[in-house]
Amino acid sequence: MQAKEGVINILNKILSADLTVINQYFVHAKMCEHWGYERLHHKVRERSMDVMKDADTFIGHILYLEDVPKVHRMTTVHLGGTVPEQLKLDLKAEQDMLTLLSEGVRHCSEVADFTTRHMLEDMAKDADAHIDWIETQMETIKRVGLENYLAEQVENER
């Protein structure tokens, strides 16, 4: 199936952002594991895997639209040296992703590509939910203090 005008460019742009953020989350998860914050390690690693599944979906969809995915356009991976820095950088990455997804939804509506639009809308809901999770973590740190927050991250959720 041939892609509508501009759809491949948008999909490749989002794919590049996904490939970048997969690495950011993966390294943040490993850092949390190294520091002994098992709960955060598992949550952030899970998000990395979720984004990897999204990237797989984008690659498959680009191939379905009879084009070749551009996987060589990763941007800079931003790493935080502390948990609060990581949360701040991850929040920015998710907000940027939500912006890209929203732009994609608008464009797909304009060119009447409803299949791609629906896929992007679902991914936007997921990004929005993760933004909410990160903001909750940041607010919890403000309320209970960083030391208390981190103490709760030592044990894995059961």
Image (cartoon, rainbow, N blue to C red):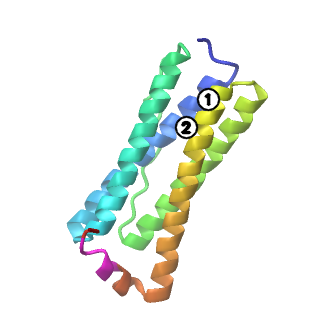
**Secondary structure category for the residue under label 2:** helix
Residue that numbered label 1 is attached to: 116
The x, y position of residue 124, in whole percent, is 59, 47
* Residue located at (35% from left, 67% from top): 81
User: 10 Å neighbourhood of mark 2: few (<14), some, or many (≥20)?
Assistant: many
Amino acid type of disc 2?
A: Ile
The x, y position of residue 126, in whole percent, is 53, 50
CA–CA distance between discs 1 and 2? 12 Å
In the picture as drawn, the residue positioned furthest to the front comes out as 158
- Pointer 1 or 2: first along the chain: 2
- Range of the magenta residues? 150-155
The x, y position of residue 66, in whole percent, is 53, 13
From the image, state whether disc 1 or disc 2 is nearer to you.
1
Residue 41 relative to residue 76: left or right: left
Magenta run includes residue 152: yes
Residue that numbered label 2 is attached to: 14
Magenta run includes residue 95: no
Q: Are marks 1 and 2 in contact (CB under 8 Å)?
A: no
